[in-house]
Amino acid sequence: MKTKIFCTLLCAILFTMCTDENNLTYTLKMDGRLTVNVKDSSDNSIKNTKVNLYVESINGSLLDAYYTNNKGVVDFGEVLAGTYVVTVDTPAIDGIKYNPLKLFQVTSGSDKNLIINIQDYIGKVKVTINLSSYLGGGPFINLDVILVPNDLYNANLSVLDLISISEFSGKTDSQGIINFSIPSRRDFRLIVYNNRKDRKNALTLVNLSKDEFKKLTYSVDTSMYIY
C-alpha cells in the first residue's frame, strides 16, 4: 500500500500581517474524508473491483489502491484537500469491462462521497463501410462487424476465435452503417469478416473518451466478401 495522508488538522498555518501590527490573520487547512461507491446502471453495487487513487492527474502519484467491499465501497480515509483522480478496473459486467476515470476535488473539512456509475463512462462510434470503387462503390450492406479487446487480439486467430472473444458485434445496415457504444479508455480492434467466417480484415484500433462521438469511414478494397 502506498503511504496514506492522514491528518486531523493541517499542518501549516499561514500567518498574514494586518495593518495593525498587533493583529494576525491565520487560516487552518483541514482534511476531507473520501469514500468511493462503484455501481452499475441499475444502481447495483459492484464488489471486489479495484479502485486507484492518484494525486492531481492520472500521471500523478498513485496514493492508494483498494478493492470495493460487498457494498461496492472503498473508504480512503482522510486525505488532504486538493485535486485527485480515481480510476476503476471492473470485472466484466454483462460480458463487458469498464475502466472509468473521474477527476474531482476534495475540499477542506468536508467529506467526499464519490459515486461512480461505470456504465456512464462510454463513447460512441459510427462506422460507415463502403465497397471499393472497383467493386462498384456504394454502401457495404449486411457486413459482419466485431470489436475485439486489443489486449486479446492476435492476427493469427481465426474468425471463430475472434468472435468468441469479441465484446460487441453487429451488421452494417442499408447505408453500410453500424453504431457502437463502447467503454471509454479501452482499446478495441474493429474487424469485419465474411459470411463463411473464413476471412477477416482488421480495419483500425478504436479508443474513445467519455461522451466522445467519433465517425469512421472505410472502403473495403477487396473482393473477398463478395459471393
Image: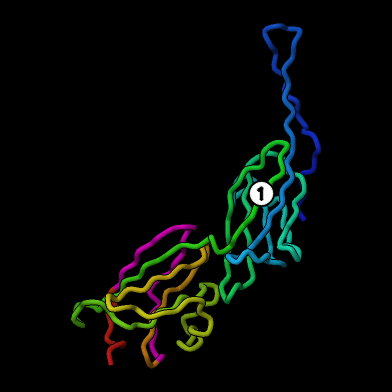
Crowding around mark 1 (Cα neighbors within 10 Å: few <14, some 14 to 19, many 20+) is few
Determine whether 219 is above or below 222 in the image.
above
- For this rendering, which residue is in front, 174 or 54? 174
Q: How is the image coloured?
A: rainbow
Snapshot quadrant of residue 190: bottom left
The x, y position of residue 64, in whole percent, is 72, 53
What residue is shown at x 28% (from left), y 78% (from top)?
Answer: 174
Quarter holding the N terminus?
bottom right
Q: How many numbered marks, from 0 up?
A: 1
Residue kind at label 1, given as amino acid type: Ser
The x, y position of residue 107, in whole percent, is 67, 38
Q: Return the residue found at the far front.
A: 42
Q: Is residue 194 magenta?
A: no
**Left-right relation of 12 to 183:** right
Q: Which range is magenta?
A: 197-218
- For this rendering, which residue is in front, 124 or 220? 124
Determine whether 195 is above or below 76 in the image.
below
**Left-right relation of 217 to 81:** left
The x, y position of residue 104, in whole percent, is 60, 46
Snapshot quadrant of residue 222: bottom left
The x, y position of residue 97, in whole percent, is 58, 70
What residue is shown at x 51% (from left), y 76% (from top)?
Answer: 167
Q: Secondary structure at mark 1?
A: loop
What residue is shown at x 65% (from left), y 51% (from top)?
Answer: 114
Kindly identify which residue carries mark 1.
Answer: 61
Determine whether 38 is above or below 8 in the image.
below
- For this rendering, which residue is in front, 177 or 129? 177
Determine whether 202 is above or below 89 in the image.
below
Snapshot quadrant of residue 106: top right
Quarter holding the C terminus?
bottom left
